[in-house]
Image (cartoon, coloured by chain):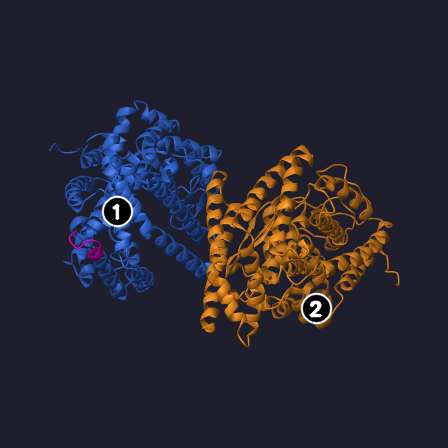
Chain colours: A orange, B blue
Amino acid sequence: MSVDAWSSLKRRMEELAELQGVLATLSWDQETQMPPKGAAARAAQTGRLARLRHERFTDPDVGRWLAEIAALPTKSPDQEAALRNIGRDYRKATKVPADLVAALSEGAAHGFQAWLAARKANDFEVFRESLEHLVSLRRQICEVIDPNAHPYELLLQEFDPGTSVVELRQLFARLTGGLRELIEAIDGVEPLPSFGDRFPVQGQREAFRRVAEAMGYDLTAGRIDISEHPFTTSLGPGDTRITIRVFEDDLLGGLGPTVHEAGHALYEQGLPWDKVGSSVGQAAGMGLHESQSRLWENFIGRSAPFMRWFGNEMESVFAGRSVDADALFRAANRVAPTLTRVEADEVTYNLHVGIRFELELALLEGTLEVRDLPAAWNDSYEKVLGIRPPDDLTGVLQDVHWSHGMFGYFPSYTLGNLYAASMGATLEEHIPTLWQDVERGDFGNVLSWLREHVHSRGHVHDAPRLVADAVGERDHVEDLLSYLWSRHGLLHGVTRPLS
Amino acid sequence: MSVDAWSSLKRRMEELAELQGVLATLSWDQETQMPPKGAAARAAQTGRLARLRHERFTDPDVGRWLAEIAALPTKSPDQEAALRNIGRDYRKATKVPADLVAALSEGAAHGFQAWLAARKANDFEVFRESLEHLVSLRRQICEVIDPNAHPYELLLQEFDPGTSVVELRQLFARLTGGLRELIEAIDGVEPLPSFGDRFPVQGQREAFRRVAEAMGYDLTAGRIDISEHPFTTSLGPGDTRITIRVFEDDLLGGLGPTVHEAGHALYEQGLPWDKVGSSVGQAAGMGLHESQSRLWENFIGRSAPFMRWFGNEMESVFAGRSVDADALFRAANRVAPTLTRVEADEVTYNLHVGIRFELELALLEGTLEVRDLPAAWNDSYEKVLGIRPPDDLTGVLQDVHWSHGMFGYFPSYTLGNLYAASMGATLEEHIPTLWQDVERGDFGNVLSWLREHVHSRGHVHDAPRLVADAVGERDHVEDLLSYLWSRHGLLHGVTRPLS
């Protein structure tokens, strides 16, 4: 009987994964290929499949199978993972009434339009009512899921199961303090020069393809296209695609996102896809996913050895031109507070995230009203980064997330940086030839370690446990601060004060 | 109650059309974008959605709604169309047992592989058993649908509802006789020269895009990509895509398929998409669809005025080069019997189709055994076209259709040419400035006529009635022969004997 429940559950989850792959295909096509007039039909197709997927998931059979598996006297690790991962999602999906789901979906569609209009008008007021509605809906949804839980705790479960609000508060408090110390030290010295050499885009695309392939991205199971906002998506096992962007006058502005997305793609390509049915064949949260992109983008991809290798590749693609790898390295590691998160360097980046985390918490707890959000935003920037946005466009209206009703995602970015720092430190300990390998464009040892300790484990545990298994019991905040001081302190001629 | 049935039926058909659009998206992506390792997952996704679509269509509710609408004392034209179109498909879909559907699907997958292997070995024997199995399955399926009907009649309903085996036999008999008369006349004169000028592919793509746009193809509701076998597909309303091919040394080999596919796409873009739910918002058969591609490809696209306009476009794209429009016109209208259908000129083309029609009929009737097929094929070519294939590869193994278990499609090609001939004659009568317009690249009058008389009518009637409404009661065979004699007779200096 329980064997039946287990195989029935896995079959259903495989079906849902197939539908998810179809939805990913529709979405990838929409972002990269679809002609404008196809939009309405695509929305209807997507809505239809999403509803179907929801129905098949919230089917009472799924609950019955989960209960039968839970009652087993002994369970395999995959069964434990399924009970935790699928059970968590199932309880949430079945508790939220359909009209609340529909209201959120509709509110998000309107919210996005209102956000676009508000950006056009450079006026938060145009977006205010929509955002109030979305915050209220999110709070209601959290209330029906579990009235006793902190609402932000429930949001975190969607993106980073296994991480608590209390832990995040502590992480951000320590990290913010440490980062401000580094930023203040750097603030006193001459900023690093930027890199302005121009390269034709076709050659850059070829160079970026070489980078992704050298990292280990399997192009017979993927492809690289151009889009305004780079992203990675899996359309199914054996089909993980990335998009990049290329600018003639901004080589680093194309390189960084390429390495970042290829990092995401390596994680996806390394997942145990044969375990999709038990939920083990999926990523263990968005923070861990971001750790894979950030480790490659920053720890590897902004290092001096990497830039020396990349400079050689560029010289090979653009035969006859000389490329100054040291200038690339220095420009890739410029540090300066900015108003815009997506343009931030890796030192100030997490302060942007910390600000959003605090504001989201206050909105969800009800201690901050949406109407007071722009002022709170600006005050935070002034306090934390020392700069005050002159208007809403460069301030509270810069991120798209809230307009989609998406709250609780931002911490994933910082969790990613934290996990990546501990993984980077571990890689340096375990691979004595690490930087010589990187300088030769040989990333095989890095990828092997990630495949063994991260990718192949899928979602057998939530990210905190999985990372601890991989790197041991390390202090991620200390690892990140130590890494940032060593790279950026050195470059700027400042050293960390003894504490 | 019956109002409910009507709107319920339309809603269900809209749902099925949405799923069809999703399947078309998966298929387009597979043909043009998907990396090789994505194949297995894509097959699973496609199979899952196809099964779902079949279940939703064969739902007994659909039969109940159809019965209620059939019982209405008066019916709208859309309701008449729905009863005819949907009813026909529903009866067939519900009569065929699931295991027979699965056997055919599996047999087709194996058949395609066996066909590939047979082509590689240039040996029909490698394919024979698979083809025997497929013919047997098709005959069984026809038997369960209607044991009293001619099996080929049932196959025709899938592609060209409204056309009967008896009519086709008569059409092919008259057409074959008339065509052989023309071919024999041409056979005595010097063949026209071919066109070998080379043009870089990028410029050709630009020229082909201009051709498609000039014809009226809306690129904000479509796109043009490259694939080995050109095709047209609608991913939903507002999203009809074509693929083309481009060869540096074969300008006409790229131009013809471009005009052909753009002709298909214009039909799709002009369908009454708001009537998808009643089945009126779809093409009225594959023969009519082919008429739209053939009318543009041959009647318009191989004409001297068209070539003069196209020559100017080429000269504008390839600034400074001169393009000999007369040489293009003459090369595009070379006539010579070939062994391969897809390489045939428009005069001999229908003889290839007639041969296949006779062989398919005999296979389905059981008067020809699969083991005797290669000899029968070769005999037919010798008798009808005067040339005998030296091997299976250039003979019976050339078409993919049968390997997919697809029988009964070939006549659509000739029906398309026949309908197109009568439409061409009608256009010449109704648009006095037709050829001056074409020479200026102004295709607006042609498209308007097609939109009004063909595209916008969708599937309100089956093709024969719809074509009769558009062109009057014309003799399609005579129209086609007359058109071919006037264009190709003139070019080769031969005149039609008085009958």
Question: Is residue B141 highlighted in magenta?
Answer: no
> Is B478 displayed left or right of A72 in the figure?
left
**From what the image shows, is residue A412 above or below residue A33?**
below
Secondary structure under tag 1 reads helix
Q: CA distance from mark 2 to mark 1?
A: 66 Å
Mark 1 — on which chain does it sit? B
Looking at the rendered structure, the kind of residue marked 1 is Arg
Q: Are marks 2 and 1 on the same chain?
A: no
Which residue is identified by label 1?
B88
Disc 2 versus disc 1: nearer the observer = 1
Residue B379 location, quadrant: bottom left
Judging from the image, what secondary structure is the residue with disc 2 in?
Answer: helix
Which stretch appears magenta? B142-149
x and y percentages locating residue A128 in the rendered image: 67, 38
Tell which of A393 and A166 is nearer to you.
Answer: A166
> Which numbered circle lies on residue A427?
2
